[in-house]
Image (tube, helix red, strand yellow):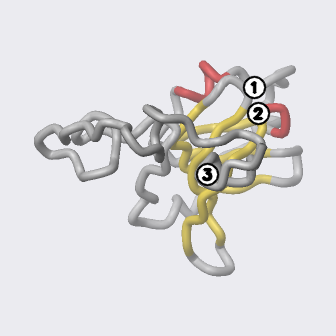
């Protein structure tokens, strides 16, 4: 079964009446201050959405590598660093500045600082790949 109006890349899943992108799906009115087509609360970032990148570069000083060793990075722990400059180590020798905007059960997403291009770039990271982190 091929559904030309189904989800992208899923030819076997046809578009169903009453679901988004289908004919007959009722359009919801926007709340005051909400942009058309953007779900979420006015004035707050969307969960799972791509929030705005920081408007300035990260701090010049790289924090010291934590002395204690964690066995796994917990989503609840890194959630305390949301919307804060955070230094992430994927190993003792490799690290980068990160500005997290979303934390899931197994991953974190946000903006990674690219010092060569002098800009923030949106990425997602599996929490198992993070060795240590420190937010400032």
- Spot occupied by residue 122 in the image (x, y as percentages of width and height): 60, 58
Residue drawn at x 39%, y 65% as measured from the top left: 55
| Residues at discs 2 and 1 in contact (Cβ within 8 Å) | yes
Q: Is residue 57 above or below residue 80?
A: below
The residue that label 3 is drawn on is 98
The residue that label 1 is drawn on is 73
Of residues 80 and 13, the one nearer the viewer is: 13
Tag 1 secondary structure: loop
The residue that label 2 is drawn on is 127
Gap in Å between the C-alphas at discs 1 and 3? 15 Å
**Residue 49 placement, left or right of 130:** left
Gap in Å between the C-alphas at discs 2 and 1? 6 Å
**Residue 25 placement, left or right of 103:** left
| Residues at discs 2 and 3 in contact (Cβ within 8 Å) | no
Q: Can you tell which of label 2 and label 1 is closer to the viewer? A: 2
Please report whichever mark, 1 or 3, sits nearer to the chain's N-terminal start.
1
- Spot occupied by residue 22 in the image (x, y as percentages of width and height): 47, 44
Locate residue 111: give its quadrant.
bottom right
Residue drawn at x 74%, y 47% as measured from the top left: 10
Please report whichever mark, 2 or 3, sits nearer to the chain's N-terminal start.
3
Gap in Å between the C-alphas at discs 2 and 3? 13 Å
| Residues at discs 1 and 3 in contact (Cβ within 8 Å) | no
């Amino acid at each position: 079964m091929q559904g030309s109006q189904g989800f992208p890349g899923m030819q076997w899943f046809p578009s169903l009446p009453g679901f988004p992108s289908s004919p007959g799906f009722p359009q919801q009115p926007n709340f005051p201050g909400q942009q058309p087509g953007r779900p979420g609360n006015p004035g707050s970032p969307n969960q799972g959405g791509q929030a705005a990148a920081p408007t300035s570069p990260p701090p010049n000083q790289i924090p010291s590598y934590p002395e204690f060793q964690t066995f796994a990075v917990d989503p609840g722990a890194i959630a305390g660093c949301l919307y804060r400059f955070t230094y992430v180590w994927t190993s003792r020798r490799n690290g980068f500045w990160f500005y997290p905007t979303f934390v899931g059960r197994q991953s974190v997403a946000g903006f990674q600082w690219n010092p060569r291009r002098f800009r923030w770039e949106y990425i997602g990271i599996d929490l198992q790949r993070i060795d240590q982190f420190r937010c400032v």
